[in-house]
Amino acid sequence: MGKKIKKEVEPPPKDVFDPLSVESKKAATVVLMLSSPEEEVLSKACEAIYKFASKGEENKLTLLDLGALEPLFKLVTHEDPIVRRNATMVVGVMASHNDVKKSLRQLDVTSAFIARLAPEEDVVTHEFASLCLVHMAAEYNSKVQIFEQGGLEPLISLLGSPDPDVKKNCVECIYNMVQDFQSRAAVRELNVIPPLLDLLKSDYPIIQLLALKTLGIISIDRETRVMLREHQGLDHLFKILETKEFNDLHVEALGVVANCLEDVDTMQLIQETGGLRKLLAFTEVSTLTDFQKNAAKAIAKAAYDPENRKILNEQEVEKCLVTLLGTDNDGTKIAASQAIAAMCENLASKQTIGTLGIPQLVQLLSSDNEEVKEAAATALVNLTTAHPANASAVAEADGIEPLINLLSSKRDGVVASAATVLTNLATQEPLRLSIQSHGIMTAIVEPLHSTNSIVQSRAALTVAAVGCDADARTELRNSGGLDPLIKLLYSKHDEVRRNACWAVMVCAADDPTAAAMTRLGALDILEEINLSIGRKNNFSDAALDKILDHNLPQKYSQMGFLTSSNIITDGFYDFGQVKPGVKLLSLEELSAQQLNDRRAIILVNSKTPELELTAPPVATDEKSPQDFLSSRVTTSSSSTNRKISRERARKGKGKKEEEKPKEEEPEPVMPKIVEEVPLKALWYPPVDSILVDYITEVSKTILPLPTTKEQVVALAQFVAEKMGGPIETDKLHEFSWELHISEIEYELKCNVVPIGKINKGTFYHRALLFKVLADRIGVSCSLVRGEYTRAWNEVKLVDDSPLGIPGLLLPPQVYIVDLMYQPGNLMKEGSPEADRYGRI
């Protein structure tokens, strides 16, 4: 019984391998283990690879080259949670490498990592899955994938995770995602505002910063700003701004507030709670240059709304902005200048800033930073527009010279703004004269050559503003400014072309400038513009008319009318109607032509040339008609030539002058050597002595008449008498004026006929003579060309009061003067009688 029973132990199964610990110092070996079917091996292999990958970027690339990424990604969806977690850790760490990210995109991993954000996964899995998505969301295509695969909702849910790393990764991923507008709208619908505001209370600055950056992006949308206001988000933001310890968050918090300030309702709320005044106070005393710069930008954005400008003005924002102009940071100066430019839409702000800030802005015009110059000049544009007091303040602050200096800047915005400020100043005559004295017209030539349409437009406008002074026009002409100005008429930009036409119209106020512009082709292009419906503008007609006002023969031939302000002077000639674009030959060229069968050219000239030497004799009956029409005189700058005989002057011969007797001198001196100066023949139109007599006669007999009406009637009768008398309507065809004109042409051997020699004149001869004589005695009238040799004069006369009321003034009426049938008869414009006169 005491015998001990021995228990037999069963041997282990033959197909089971005893546990084995494997150690390896080679990554390749561990990568091979990722294909093991054993969960423990997979888990430990992932652990080892994680430690290896965490040591640096080179190790991540080594793992990629060893082909570890694909088996690792397969393990991310493994059924074992530990394997899944460890594999996620490895891929999350490796995803920071760019080459790894490219491979991950090819493997289409986003849906797998979104699945790892599920609530049943552990915190570590959440951390590294979100980390991988952070890296992936930095690229646009991956953002789209995350959005389309529903990744935003689990990311937002995990903003409330107890783990700070998970919060950090999720909010950073959301920040990357909301750079795209679709994601911004989606997170708003998923109610992202409350969890983001909770993150502002985090103990970790990086989480607070990312939350603020995200709020800064999504608050670009108005609907999000409304939600932010409804969740008392502004209170959270101002708490950060009021806390000195959060200095590193102030700039980002201000960015969110800046977006909110764009809404009038939010602006009013901030004002009512005192937040706006606090914000301005923070800005003035802040030592953070970025904060001051962003505050100025926030004010500028808010100031685009009229109601916001009113609120900002009530809070005296102008003082804050002027203070910021004096900072040492160029970015702050630029932002403050831009804010001032925006606030100037409010008249009260424009006045306040004009008083406080113009000297500082003028100083900024001399900055070394071109952007500062541009911002300051733009602010001055808005300050001086339609505000004479501010324009004067710029001049008083010695701003004219630096503004003119800016016209040579290489930055187009600087030049355009400087030109506009100068244009604003030039609306006041004293300032315009001051601008002109600083050489504005010479300085503006370079901007006129610019290829930038805005600069071209503003430069042309400056020329229009300053060119009303004769000295300025002379300076522009002498400095070569007319050529680029005329070229701007060819511009395809409507505003450039319009302003160029305006400038041409202004500068064509004197003969030399108008003549120079004509030589440069201004007439051609203006005629072309006016024929185009699309290119014609308010000033193109006026510019053409203004240039033609200094070339009345061309105007009358081309336009067919002369206004009462177009005074016919000596040297005028009526060539007849021509088509637009046809240029007339000069009177000298026409006089030199052989006699032909075209209509005669009617010459008006009662002036004897004023010469330094003795004038040629007046034509007499003994002198040939051809000599009468081709009178030539010579001039010389040498005083010795002033005593040349009348005959030699008439023939234009420059023979060597006979030696003068030497004058006695008190002391012997070396004899003077007088060099021969060749005489250059100048052509002058022949003097119409008969027209001279007409002018003398009407000045004596008609000018003294007491009323304009009597003067008009008497002058009409005088003209008719000198040109063949009244003609009966039914006998007009018997009035052989054509033969008479032909006889004069044959007599003179020339197509140019002085008007005084015409004894039988029809409508257009009489109307021209009436206009010539009326202009000489101060009777205002116009000259209008009709068809078929018709022409007439229009005068404005005041009728007697139809009611007989003394002192009752009536507007003047336009009358057509009859010079043919009943000379002196005045026909009211538009009446059947007047219409027949112009047609029959």
Image (cartoon, rainbow, N blue to C red):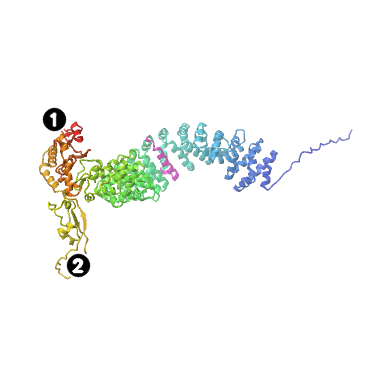
The secondary structure that dominates the magenta segment is: helix
Q: Which mark is residue 387?
A: none
User: In the rendered image of this protein, does residue 260 appear above or below residue 635?
Assistant: above
| Magenta span includes 688 | no
Quarter-wise, where is residue 257 in the image? top left
First in sequence: mark 2 vs mark 1: 2
Where is residue 721? Give x, y as percent. Answer: 12, 40
Residue carrying label 1:
805
Specify start and end residues of the magenta stretch as a single range: 284-306
**Helix, strand, or loop for circle 1?**
loop
Looking at the image, is mark 2 or mark 1 nearer the viewer?
2
Q: Residues within 10 Å of mark 1 (few under 14, many from 20)?
A: few
Is the Cβ of the residue at disc 2 closer than 8 Å to that at disc 1?
no
Amino acid tagged 1 = Ile
State the SS at label 2.
loop
Residue to which mark 2 is pinned: 672
| Image mark count | 2
Residue at screen point 79% across, 38% down:
14
- Are there few (<14), some (14-19), or many (20+) residues within 10 Å of tag 2? few
In this view, the residue farthest toward the bottom is 668
**Residue 299 magenta:** yes
